[in-house]
Image: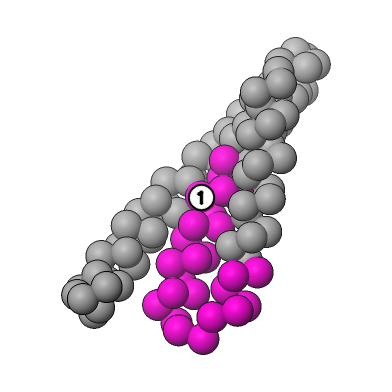
Amino acid sequence: MFIFAALIVISIVLYIYYKVAILKTKDGLTQRYFNAKARIFLGLFLFSFGINQYIAYQTKLVLFISVVFLFLGGLQMFDGFKEAKHYRNEYKRLHPNE
């Protein structure tokens, strides 16, 4: 249970970090990359929150809500990983010397 609580805190802090980093940069490609990273951590937050709530309460209603959170968190992480990989490769293609 402590592991999921730590994952919840770490993922929400990193989500906020990447959302603030978007505001600090002017490059559109970097903004999209940071947004993809933020989506990964939002998905991790939803996923770990769903597991944590089910472990804590273990009722049918919480099971249904947890499944929804797991599904949405998984989708966010999957899309975030795909986007981050795409934008990382685009950045490397456009800036080969860095």
Asked whether residue 78 appears in the rendered view, the answer is yes
The image position of residue 66, as x and y in percent, is: 67, 29
Q: Measured along the vertical axis of the image, is residue 14 above or below residue 23?
A: above
Dominant SS of magenta comes to: helix
Q: Which residue lies furthest to the top in this view?
A: 58
- Queried whether the magenta region covers residue 23, the answer comes back as yes
The residue positioned 32% from the left and 64% from the top of the image is 88
Q: Quadrant of residue 90?
A: bottom left
Figure check: 35 above or below 62: below
Q: Is residue 9 magenta?
A: no
Residue lying at the far front in this picture: please name it: 97
Would residue 64 be seen by someone viewing this image from the given angle? no
SS for callout 1:
helix
User: Of the residues shown, which amino acid type is indicated by label 1?
Assistant: Ile
Of the pair 74 and 4, the residue shown nearer to us: 4
| Residue nearest the viewer, comparing 93 with 55 | 93
Query: Is residue 77 rendered to the left or right of residue 57?
Result: left
Q: Which residue is drawn at 62% across and 78% down?
A: 23
Q: Give the range drawn in magenta.
A: 20-44
Vertical position of residue 79 compared to residue 44: above or below: below
Q: Mark 1 points at which residue?
A: 40
**In the image, what residue occupies the spot 60% across and 79% down?**
24
- The answer to whether 63 is drawn above or below residue 86 in the figure is above
Q: In this view, does 7 lie to the left or right of 38?
A: right
Going by the image, does 37 lie left or right of 10? left
**Nearer-the-camera pick, 25 or 78:** 25
Q: How crowded is mark 1: few (under 14 residues within 10 Å), some or many (20 or more)?
A: many
